[in-house]
Amino acid sequence: MEVIYWIADNVFGTPAILLGFIVLVGLLLQDKTASQRVSGTFKAIIGFLIISAGSDIIVSALTVFEPLWKEVFNLSEQPLGEFMGQNAFNAEYGSAVTLAMTIGFLINVLLARFTKLKYIYLTGHMMFWTTTIFAGIVVHTVGDVSFGKLVMFLAVIMGIYWTVQPALTQPFMRKITGNDNIALGHTSASVALLGALAGKVLGNKDNDSEKIKLPKGLEFLRDSNVITALTMGLLFLVGAVIISFKDTPGAEELVASAGSQNFVIYAIVQSFTFTAGIAVVLMGVRMFIGEMVPAFKGIATKIVPGAKPALDSPVVFPYAPNAVILGFLGSFAGALLWLFVLGNTVGYIFVPTMIVLFFHSATAGVFGNVTGGVRGALMAGFITSTVVAWGQYITVKMLLADTIPDTAMWAADSDMFILGPIIRFLAQLLF
Amino acid sequence: MKVLSVCGLGQGTSLILKMNVEQALSEKGIRADVEHMDVSSASSMSADYIITSNELAEGLEGHSAKLIIVNNYFDMDEINQAIDEHIAKA
């Protein structure tokens, strides 16, 4: 018995070690050399630990961003409050998330094997974030939750979601790619669908976005670090300049927190810190997902003949590069509008992260263009920021306020916001 | 030999490209370490070859590695052709 407890604590209870084992098994199943197996396992473990470090950096910048804009809008409500944060959450529930993700994938493979939905979900980093956010919602909803129950609940939900979501978007994917070989496996599927439907009803298909010529100067928008720093930098800058001209106690307190440094400079450094935090987290995710997904793919192709891979959202970008930019523009306009509206009405400071606003709006833009041309692409982008802004407000304030609201602010997407209330309802029903 | 596969975020898409490139290289009997990442990280990494799309390649000009353009990351024919042209011949 003691052996079992020891294993439960030290292997299943330590997410980094558990992940290392899962990746090692995956590497053993593949045609890899011993040295690749060692480095792969080590990188998976290190990668998982890097995520916590990066999360802390993001939180440190967000704790400046929040009060800054609260002060701009003259809001006196309580700040984010007491929450676990990704770091503590990983320590307690990281193993359940890791295991649920693995079993969920196996359910996806089995469903693809025995039903008509032949899609294998391979966008590993989104598998991780979706499972994490849903775990946060369950823990927030039911409080004390047993390890086994949490794993099984999440695994079944994820397995079904990863099988059904690509099937729902596939009719439009066929139109976009002109064939039936690849599918979309991404958490922006809901806004892509909404964008395509809006384009169909209100757009004009004949006004294809690919007929217009866009300036070459917009190419830098494809580097995620640059766009994140640029837009967060602008928001920090605007906020900081407004604060510098205010003489309320709150504004003075904020300026004082910069110490001897000029407050505007301090705020700009915070925007780069935020971007740096995201870069660190993404590096960690890349390190373990890069080992895990090839193993997953190897398993899937052996078990499911004729399977179609459901892939990351940029798969659609080459089919309509202009719609990508139009989706972003529509979304950016929406983000600024909602930042202002949410701040003035419900008193929530929306964090419009550029990963969501660029990559996800771009995907929606391509879907909107295929049914509604230029107007469809712009609307799809606007829909994306609308869902993300209101979704973020509801999710952060109501669905996971005491678990991982920090992560929901920068790593949660439209599908998670739309499915979140359903997860909460199911958790109440079943736990 | 070290090869980088690069996309905008350095997560899913470049990973698929990495797997496809690994498969193509091993079929040709070429031994290589392939890593996937985003443009910013790639610009500060040393490598022999960087495989990426046309738009992203602009941000990597002047890199010591040889740039190979692949526009459709899922098209094995295009990947095979690019490797034949640039790596297998070298």
Image (cartoon, coloured by chain):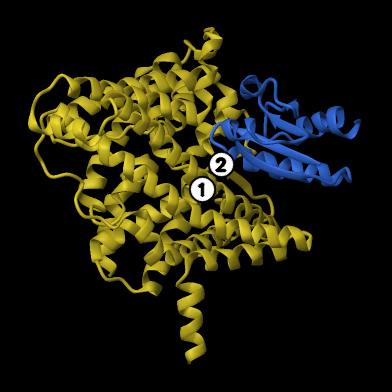
Q: Residues within 10 Å of mark 1 (few under 14, many from 20)?
A: some
Residue drawn at point x = 51 percent, y = 16 percent: A322
Do we see residue A204 in this rendering?
no
Badge 2: chain ID: B
Closer-to-camera residue (A199/A386):
A386
Residue A125: give its label: 1
Chain that bears disc 1: A
Residue A312: x and y, percent? 54, 40
- Label 2 packing within 10 angstroms: few (<14), some (14-19), many (20+): many
Chain coloured blue in the rendered structure: B
Q: Is residue A359 above or below residue A296?
A: above
Give the image location of residue B60, x and y in percent. Answer: 65, 24
Q: How far from the left and from the top, in percent, is residue A391?
A: 28, 40
Helix, strand or loop under label 1? helix
**Residue at the front extreme?**
A260
Q: Is residue A308 left or right of residue A204?
A: right
Tell me where residue A273 sits by quadrant: top left
What whole-number distance in Å separates the C-alpha atoms at marks 1 and 2?
7 Å
Q: Colour of chain A?
A: yellow
Residue B74 showing in the rendered view: yes
Label 2 near label 1: C-beta < 8 Å? yes
- Labels 1 and 2 in the same subunit: no
Q: Quadrant of residue A176?
A: top right
The amino acid type, in three-letter code, at marker 2 is Gln
Q: Residue at x 49, y 83 (%)?
A: A6
Q: Circle 2 is placed at which residue position? A: B11
Q: Dot 2 lies on which element?
A: loop
